[in-house]
Amino acid sequence: MRESRFSGGAPKKKFQRRRFSRKKVCRFCEQKTVYIDFKNYRMLREFLTERGKIVPRRITGTCAKHQRMLTISIKQARNIALLAFTHR
């Protein structure tokens, strides 16, 4: 049965998707990290895509404070050639 357009509501969807997502927790806050070191390039590499872009915080779950520190550290590591600017 279809509702008429005067019934006051939109037709109901058959399939409604529910998204169950866990709250992402900043891994640096958990470890109580004070400073993110640019010399630790192996750890910094986890926050880069395969093309060399910095992964945003909505995906990684880092807090704003640590995301800023992470971005600065990645840029420092790129400038002294510990990390590549782009993929090969």
Image: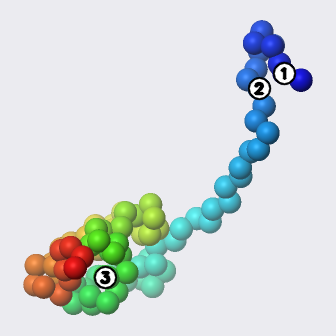
Q: Amino acid at mark 3?
A: Leu
Q: Quadrant of residue 19?
A: bottom right
Q: Locate residue 78, reporting x and y percent.
A: 16, 79
What residue is rendered at 37% in x and 81% in y?
A: 46
Q: Nearer the viewer, mark 2 or mark 1?
A: 1
Q: Amino acid at mark 2?
A: Pro
Q: Nearer the viewer, mark 3 or mark 2?
A: 2
What residue is rendered at 68% in x and 60% in y?
A: 20
- Residue 68 to residue 44: above or below: above
**Residue 69 visible to the viewer:** no
Q: Locate residue 42, reporting x and y percent.
A: 32, 90
Mark 2 lies on residue:
11
Mark 3 lies on residue:
44
Query: Can you tell which mark lies on residue 2?
Result: 1
Q: Locate residue 23, reporting x and y percent.
A: 58, 65
Mark sitting earlier along the chain (3/2) = 2
Mark sitting earlier along the chain (2/1) = 1
In this view, which residue lies farthest toward the right? 1
